[in-house]
Image (spheres, grey):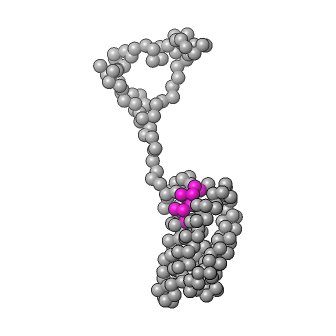
Amino acid sequence: MCPTPLGRTQTRTAILVGPAILGLILTLITGNEGFIVLIGLYLVTGVILDILFYPRIIKWQPPWLTFVLGAGEFVILYVLAQILDIGLKPLDAVWFYWVSWTLAVWTRIVILPILSLTWIESGGEFRETGWSHAPENEPMPILAAMSEDGKGKASGRLAQEFSAVNPVPADVRELPSPSGTHRQPERLRR
Protein backbone atom coordinates (compact mmCIF):
# COMPACT_ATOMS: atom_id res chain seq x y z
CA MET A 1 0.00 0.00 0.00
CA CYS A 2 1.20 3.49 -0.80
CA PRO A 3 -0.95 5.75 1.39
CA THR A 4 -1.53 9.41 0.66
CA PRO A 5 -1.40 11.94 3.52
CA LEU A 6 -5.21 12.17 3.41
CA GLY A 7 -5.41 8.37 3.32
CA ARG A 8 -3.10 8.08 6.33
CA THR A 9 -5.24 10.56 8.28
CA GLN A 10 -8.53 8.89 7.34
CA THR A 11 -7.14 5.44 8.08
CA ARG A 12 -5.71 6.49 11.45
CA THR A 13 -9.02 8.02 12.47
CA ALA A 14 -10.93 4.90 11.41
CA ILE A 15 -8.61 2.42 13.14
CA LEU A 16 -8.71 4.35 16.42
CA VAL A 17 -12.49 4.01 16.77
CA GLY A 18 -12.12 0.61 18.49
CA PRO A 19 -9.42 1.81 20.91
CA ALA A 20 -11.52 4.93 21.62
CA ILE A 21 -14.48 2.74 22.56
CA LEU A 22 -12.20 0.63 24.75
CA GLY A 23 -10.80 3.82 26.35
CA LEU A 24 -14.32 5.11 26.97
CA ILE A 25 -15.34 1.85 28.63
CA LEU A 26 -12.22 1.85 30.84
CA THR A 27 -12.79 5.52 31.69
CA LEU A 28 -16.37 4.80 32.77
CA ILE A 29 -15.38 1.72 34.78
CA THR A 30 -12.33 3.17 36.55
CA GLY A 31 -13.37 6.82 36.69
CA ASN A 32 -9.92 7.74 35.30
CA GLU A 33 -10.23 9.88 32.18
CA GLY A 34 -6.58 9.22 31.33
CA PHE A 35 -7.51 6.31 29.05
CA ILE A 36 -9.65 8.36 26.70
CA VAL A 37 -7.21 11.28 26.89
CA LEU A 38 -4.38 8.95 25.86
CA ILE A 39 -6.36 7.86 22.77
CA GLY A 40 -7.05 11.51 21.88
CA LEU A 41 -3.37 12.32 22.27
CA TYR A 42 -2.54 9.23 20.19
CA LEU A 43 -4.84 10.46 17.40
CA VAL A 44 -3.50 14.04 17.40
CA THR A 45 0.14 12.91 17.53
CA GLY A 46 -0.45 10.35 14.79
CA VAL A 47 -2.21 12.81 12.49
CA ILE A 48 0.61 15.33 12.91
CA LEU A 49 3.16 12.62 12.08
CA ASP A 50 1.04 11.40 9.14
CA ILE A 51 0.80 14.87 7.62
CA LEU A 52 4.19 16.40 8.36
CA PHE A 53 6.74 13.64 8.92
CA TYR A 54 5.85 10.29 7.36
CA PRO A 55 5.32 11.49 3.77
CA ARG A 56 8.86 12.91 3.79
CA ILE A 57 10.61 9.75 4.99
CA ILE A 58 8.37 6.86 3.85
CA LYS A 59 7.92 6.28 0.14
CA TRP A 60 6.85 2.64 0.50
CA GLN A 61 5.77 0.97 3.72
CA PRO A 62 6.66 -2.71 4.09
CA PRO A 63 4.73 -4.68 6.73
CA TRP A 64 7.62 -4.80 9.22
CA LEU A 65 7.78 -0.99 9.30
CA THR A 66 4.38 -0.89 11.01
CA PHE A 67 5.91 -2.18 14.25
CA VAL A 68 8.88 0.21 14.01
CA LEU A 69 6.52 3.17 13.54
CA GLY A 70 4.36 1.89 16.41
CA ALA A 71 7.41 1.73 18.70
CA GLY A 72 8.46 5.24 17.68
CA GLU A 73 4.97 6.59 18.24
CA PHE A 74 4.91 4.83 21.63
CA VAL A 75 8.04 6.69 22.75
CA ILE A 76 6.65 10.04 21.58
CA LEU A 77 3.25 9.38 23.15
CA TYR A 78 4.71 8.12 26.42
CA VAL A 79 6.89 11.23 26.78
CA LEU A 80 3.94 13.52 25.95
CA ALA A 81 1.68 11.67 28.41
CA GLN A 82 4.27 12.11 31.17
CA ILE A 83 4.84 15.79 30.37
CA LEU A 84 1.12 16.58 30.15
CA ASP A 85 0.34 14.39 33.20
CA ILE A 86 -2.84 12.86 31.75
CA GLY A 87 -3.58 10.95 34.94
CA LEU A 88 -2.44 7.43 34.04
CA LYS A 89 0.23 5.49 35.88
CA PRO A 90 3.20 4.72 33.58
CA LEU A 91 2.43 1.00 33.55
CA ASP A 92 -1.23 1.66 32.70
CA ALA A 93 -0.20 3.95 29.85
CA VAL A 94 2.19 1.31 28.48
CA TRP A 95 -0.21 -1.64 28.46
CA PHE A 96 -3.14 0.47 27.24
CA TYR A 97 -1.08 1.86 24.35
CA TRP A 98 0.02 -1.60 23.19
CA VAL A 99 -3.48 -3.08 23.50
CA SER A 100 -4.85 -0.09 21.55
CA TRP A 101 -2.08 -0.35 18.97
CA THR A 102 -2.74 -4.07 18.44
CA LEU A 103 -6.47 -3.44 18.13
CA ALA A 104 -5.81 -0.63 15.63
CA VAL A 105 -3.45 -2.76 13.52
CA TRP A 106 -5.93 -5.65 13.40
CA THR A 107 -8.66 -3.21 12.42
CA ARG A 108 -6.47 -1.95 9.58
CA ILE A 109 -5.52 -5.44 8.41
CA VAL A 110 -8.85 -7.25 8.80
CA ILE A 111 -11.81 -4.87 9.09
CA LEU A 112 -10.99 -1.98 6.74
CA PRO A 113 -10.46 -4.14 3.63
CA ILE A 114 -13.84 -5.75 4.31
CA LEU A 115 -15.65 -2.43 4.85
CA SER A 116 -14.07 -0.76 1.82
CA LEU A 117 -12.94 -3.13 -0.92
CA THR A 118 -10.96 -0.41 -2.72
CA TRP A 119 -9.39 1.03 0.43
CA ILE A 120 -5.89 -0.27 -0.37
CA GLU A 121 -6.03 0.74 -4.05
CA SER A 122 -7.28 4.19 -3.03
CA GLY A 123 -4.14 4.91 -0.99
CA GLY A 124 -5.92 4.42 2.31
CA GLU A 125 -8.60 6.96 1.45
CA PHE A 126 -12.28 6.22 1.84
CA ARG A 127 -13.86 7.37 -1.39
CA GLU A 128 -16.81 6.49 -3.51
CA THR A 129 -15.98 3.92 -6.13
CA GLY A 130 -17.10 4.34 -9.67
CA TRP A 131 -16.05 5.75 -12.95
CA SER A 132 -14.58 9.22 -12.87
CA HIS A 133 -15.54 9.53 -16.54
CA ALA A 134 -18.51 7.53 -17.78
CA PRO A 135 -17.49 4.89 -20.34
CA GLU A 136 -20.31 6.02 -22.62
CA ASN A 137 -18.58 9.40 -23.01
CA GLU A 138 -15.15 7.99 -23.72
CA PRO A 139 -14.19 8.07 -27.41
CA MET A 140 -13.19 4.74 -28.89
CA PRO A 141 -9.54 4.71 -29.98
CA ILE A 142 -9.98 3.63 -33.59
CA LEU A 143 -7.51 4.86 -36.17
CA ALA A 144 -7.93 4.24 -39.89
CA ALA A 145 -4.91 3.69 -42.07
CA MET A 146 -3.16 6.84 -43.17
CA SER A 147 -0.89 7.49 -46.08
CA GLU A 148 2.87 7.47 -45.53
CA ASP A 149 3.01 11.27 -45.20
CA GLY A 150 0.15 11.19 -42.66
CA LYS A 151 -1.96 13.79 -44.48
CA GLY A 152 -3.90 12.22 -47.30
CA LYS A 153 -6.45 9.48 -47.73
CA ALA A 154 -5.51 5.90 -47.11
CA SER A 155 -4.26 4.15 -50.16
CA GLY A 156 -6.06 0.88 -49.50
CA ARG A 157 -9.66 0.58 -50.69
CA LEU A 158 -10.69 -1.42 -47.61
CA ALA A 159 -9.21 1.14 -45.19
CA GLN A 160 -10.88 3.96 -47.12
CA GLU A 161 -14.19 2.11 -47.08
CA PHE A 162 -14.14 1.85 -43.28
CA SER A 163 -12.80 5.34 -42.66
CA ALA A 164 -14.85 8.40 -41.78
CA VAL A 165 -14.08 9.97 -45.17
CA ASN A 166 -17.04 8.29 -46.87
CA PRO A 167 -20.62 9.24 -45.99
CA VAL A 168 -22.60 6.70 -43.99
CA PRO A 169 -25.17 4.86 -46.15
CA ALA A 170 -28.82 5.55 -45.34
CA ASP A 171 -29.60 1.96 -44.30
CA VAL A 172 -26.73 1.97 -41.79
CA ARG A 173 -27.78 5.31 -40.23
CA GLU A 174 -30.85 3.72 -38.68
CA LEU A 175 -28.95 0.92 -36.94
CA PRO A 176 -27.93 1.28 -33.29
CA SER A 177 -24.27 1.54 -32.36
CA PRO A 178 -22.71 -1.96 -32.42
CA SER A 179 -20.91 -1.45 -29.12
CA GLY A 180 -23.86 0.27 -27.46
CA THR A 181 -21.55 2.91 -26.01
CA HIS A 182 -22.07 5.69 -28.53
CA ARG A 183 -25.22 7.38 -29.61
CA GLN A 184 -25.49 8.38 -33.20
CA PRO A 185 -25.08 12.12 -33.76
CA GLU A 186 -28.12 14.03 -34.98
CA ARG A 187 -26.51 14.68 -38.34
CA LEU A 188 -26.35 10.93 -39.05
CA ARG A 189 -29.94 10.21 -38.00
CA ARG A 190 -31.46 12.33 -40.73
Quadrant of the frame with the N terminus: bottom right
Task: Tell me where residue 53 sits by quadrant.
Answer: bottom right
Q: Nearer the viewer, residue 132 or 87?
A: 87
- Is residue 15 found left or right of 173 in the rendered image? right
User: Looking at this rendering, what residue extends furthest in the front direction?
Assistant: 83
Task: Tell me where residue 56 sits by quadrant.
Answer: bottom right
* x then y, percent, for residue 23: 52, 80
| 21 to 174, vertically: above or below | below
| 161 to 112, vertically: above or below | above
Is residue 7 highlighted in magenta?
A: yes
Residue shown at 35%/25% (left/top)? 185
Residue shown at 51%/25% (left/top)? 142
State the count of labels: 0
User: Looking at this rendering, what residue extends furthest in the left direction?
Assistant: 190
Quadrant of the frame with the C terminus: top left
* x then y, percent, for residue 18: 51, 73
- Is residue 24 found left or right of 190 in the rendered image? right
Q: Which of 59 and 127 is in front in this view?
A: 59
- Is residue 63 found left or right of 123 in the rendered image? right
Q: Nearer the viewer, residue 59 or 15?
A: 59
- Would residue 95 be seen by someone viewing this image from the given angle? no
* x then y, percent, for residue 88: 58, 86
User: Looking at this rendering, what residue extends furthest in the bottom direction?
Assistant: 30
Please state the extent of the stretch shown in magenta in the rendering.
Answer: 3-12
Is residue 177 highlighted in magenta?
A: no
Residue shown at 45%/44% (left/top)? 131
Task: Tell me where residue 92 sits by quadrant.
Answer: bottom right
| 28 to 48, vertically: above or below | below
What secondary structure predominates along the stretch shown in magenta? helix
Residue shown at 67%/67% (left/top)? 69
